[in-house]
Amino acid sequence: MAANVAVIAGAGAGLSASLARLLSKEGFRVVLAARNVDKLAALAGEIGAQAVETDVSDAASVARLFEAADKVGSLDVAVFNASGRTRGPIAELDPDAVKQALLVGAYGGFLVGQQAALRLLARGSG
């Protein structure tokens, strides 16, 4: 039987790392996704996770993430923890930076959710 898989998109050193450790302890094979996978090397090694370079604001990149997860086992959990940030007074914010932050937070969440739903619905769960 295929391993139960948890995908964490937007993985980092905080909340998502704690969740990755918990899921691993509970027997899940964890797939970590971030734009910079170098920052995930220690965590991936600690829990035996796979790290996949992913831009959640790009549909093809998210599809590749879930294709990599498919090779690990059967998706059971998908967590979206990616964010883009722009800080400062609204009158001074760069509109392109705000657009990118919205693409990461909103559109990225949709893309990850869609890929998870495709897999879960295909097997009648989720």
Image (tube, rainbow, N blue to C red):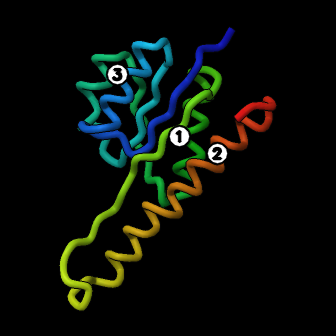
2 or 3: mark nearer the eye: 3
Residue at image point 25% right, 83% down: 93
Q: Earlier in the sequence, mark 1 or mark 2?
A: 1
Q: Are marks 1 and 2 in contact (CB under 8 Å)?
A: yes
Q: Tell me which residue sits at (34%, 17%) in the image.
A: 47
| Distance (Cα) linking label 1 and label 3 | 20 Å
Label of residue 115 in the image: 2
Rendering coords of residue 35 (x, y %): 35, 48
Q: Is residue 13 left or right of residue 74?
A: left
Q: Quadrant of the C terminus?
A: top right
**Residue wearing tag 1:** 65
Instruction: Identify residue for label 3.
Output: 21
Looking at the picture, which amino acid does disc 3 mark?
A: Arg
Residue at figure coordinates x 54%, y 37% from the top left: 78
Q: Is residue 20 above or below residue 12?
A: above
Q: Are marks 2 and 3 in contact (CB under 8 Å)?
A: no
Secondary structure beneath dot 2 equals helix
Mark 3 lies on a secondary structure that is: helix
> Dot 1: within a 10 Å radius of its alpha carbon, few (fewer than 14), some, or many (20 or more) residues?
many
Closer to the camera in the image, 9 or 36:
9
- Quadrant where the N terminus sits is top right
Q: What x and y, as percent, mark residue 48?
A: 37, 16
Compared to residue 102, the image places residue 13 above or below, namely above
Q: Residue at x 21, y 88 (%)?
A: 92
